[in-house]
Image (spheres, rainbow, N blue to C red):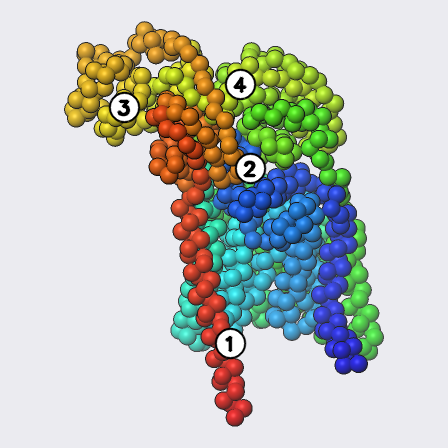
Amino acid sequence: MAIIIKLKNFVKNHFYVFVLLAFALFFFQNILSASKIMMNVHYINDVTFYSYNIKEALKNNQLPLWTPYYYSGRPLYAQPEYYFIDFNLLLVALTKNIYLAMNFSAIIHLFIAGIGMYFLANYLSGSRKAAFISALIYMFNGFVHTFVVPGNIMIIEGYSLVPLIILFYIKALKEKNFIFNSAIAGIFAAMLIFVGGVIFFPYLFLLIAAYSIIYLIDNNFTSRILKLALVGVIISAVGFGISAIKLLPDIEFMNLSNRGIGLPYQEYLGEPINLENFVYLFITNVISSGSGISAAIGIAGFVLLIFGLSKFRNKIVLFSILIIIISLLMSSDSFLTKLLYKIPVFNQTRHVERSVFLFAFASSILAGFGFLRMQSLTDKYKKIIQTAAYLLIVVLIFSELIFLQEIPKSIKSIQPNEIPILDYMGKDKSQFRTINTALSTLVGASGYNYYSQFGISEIKGGSGIWFNDYLDYLLVAQNSPAKLWGVLNNKYVIMSQNASIEGLSFVQKFNDCSNCPIWESYGPYLFKNEFFLPRYYIVPNSILVVGDSTMVKQLIYSLMLHNWEPKNTVLIEGTKINDYDIAFLKKFNFIILLKDSVDHGSIQKLREYKSQGGVIIPNILSGENSISNEGITSVLNRTGTYTELNVEEYSNNKVAISLNGKKGWLIASERFAYFPGWTASVDGTKTDILKADNAVSAVYLDGEKGNLIFEYKPNSYKYGKIISISALIILIVCLVYLVYSKHKVGGLNQN
């Protein structure tokens, strides 16, 4: 009997939580399956791709620090918008079914978004009913319907955590046990990084800054600013410490990428909102037409917001109003938009119209306070009338924000062998890459989520963050596609039209699927690259190009587009002659000297190099000071061909190749040399990885036997791991001490 009473009380106390769970399940009812997937290109492509990489990496008891499956290989774990510790990772590990994991992870995080806002609003208002209304609006406002669900669905994970961070930040400032609450806020901030929610960090900063300003409006300014500083230090220390294992690789990744120096203003600006569309943007998208992003909270929600404004003397209401003003200014290309662009992190953020998220967040809270104001006006009526009025409000919100909205659709998850053109390529057991030209852009979803499941890597990719040197290569490759794609281990080319490109031979036309979400992956035209080169091979000839880095790259491209034969000659990117010893220089048949490559101290090295049979172009030892056509012809007019090497092991973060005493330059059609963290060693002895052919990597072999191991262990991850483990241990010790001290003091007081 006692158990039944406890169960009833539990259900009564958490009734709204169960209702929010039911709403989340109702909204995502179409993906309550292990064989269906949400009808969303980002979901089908990006989430599937990352989930598959996680699944494969977990088989080797590792994380997918690197992926070989798109952009010819690049860091994956370090990409800021990809998640690490979350329900998707847990479900992939437990079920081994990536679609089941993806679907239920989305449902769980929508539910967390609801209960996070419910707990926050309940703490701020002291009313479960008001909190439930706030949670409903936060879960199902226009931002969710127009950006989160149809866009990059992965951001739902970060979206779900923002209310919890703000909740414990406010609790830390308002309550005595600020250390505990600050630590919890820091943990949730770390989780925001773990789940790939960096898109929300600029907005989180504005939320915290706005509340801090409101908090400081008090007579006791000095003590408040001191507490604010202490809370800020604790949250920052815990957040950084716990998340360092992900944050440091994220920072390194961003600094190397196209966003390292910030985005152009127009890309940062995106598509600013037009306040003439205020109704669609912020009130309703049911009876008002519009396109693009919205943060509509519904007619009933907006009426409650208006009622909430009447409580403007309340600091939380003031905070919400301030956030709404910031949201309107930031998303509409105002002076604030331009001011924030000058701040690091903000200038690495695309599409500031997404800052309407702030309106959705603040309006959810304000609507709860509006309900309290409306409820106070009905105090003179009977309780049944008050209850009926509350239920009516809930029904109106539910009807407009859920029932009248389009429930996310689903389709059957496609298995790779169900795509005819991919099924054909999958039967080729050699190691190769493909390129899909159906999309004219060099970035964009093109089926790599499917190809990867057959172990096939793509030359292009779909992420909005890329590396300029590689995109430069792909741009240049359009002048001689077959040869330069071949350098990237390209064997098959997929096209949507039957085109004629020199060096590509037609294979077959397959069945297409024009109405499929990722129709590009079906082709239907398949071509074979006659300039295909293996993933790992040794060439007989080598050229070192030294000097100004820009000029070096330009000359290498010039050589590549003329008579260069990649099957027998490698082009190594160098710096200055004095950066190398003579033993290194003697590994090359030719050295091409460009601006800033030599000084007076280089002459002796060059003489010794030439005496050993090496060729210098131009031959400055004989008075030449410019590169002649004859010199270039002698460099490129070489014979011979490559020797392919067999790969013994190939995983996300490690490659093993068996050596049998060969000498010469090993070309790895990999991006290893362009990212810090990759090492090469032969039986434990390290060797350098050099940039080759402006896109791939090279290692010199000196007749070694044994295993050549390429391994990816970036320092950013190693140091981050040490920091995170140390921070976690310190945090646990501190929290245990706080709990122990509290109980000890409580016990003494009772005695």
Give the mark nearest the N terminus, 3 or 2: 2
Do callouts 3 and 2 mark residues in contact (Cβ within 8 Å)? no
Query: Percent position (x, y) of residue 193?
Result: 52, 53
Give the mark nearest the N terminus, 1 or 3: 3
Gap between marks 4 and 2 measured at Cα: 26 Å
Gap between marks 1 and 3 measured at Cα: 65 Å
310 above or below 631? below
Give the residue at x 42% y 44%.
Answer: 714
Residue 516 lies left or right of residue 91; in this view the side is right
SS of the residue under disc 4: loop
Q: How crowded is mark 1: few (under 14 residues within 10 Å), some or many (20 or more)?
A: few
| Residue that carries the numbered disc 3 in the rendered image | 585
At label 3, which amino acid type do we have?
Answer: Leu
| Residue that carries the numbered disc 1 in the rendered image | 739
Residue 63 lies left or right of residue 101; in this view the side is left
Query: Percent position (x, y) of residue 164?
Result: 58, 62
Give the mark nearest the N terminus, 3 or 4: 4
Give the residue at x 49% y 40%.
Answer: 653
At label 2, which amino acid type do we have?
Answer: Ser
Give the mark nearest the N terminus, 1 or 2: 2
- Tally the numbered discs: 4
| Residue that carries the numbered disc 2 in the rendered image | 463
Give the mark nearest the N terminus, 1 or 4: 4
Q: Which of marks 1 and 2 is in front?
A: 1
Gap between marks 1 and 2 measured at Cα: 45 Å
| Residue that carries the numbered disc 4 in the rendered image | 532
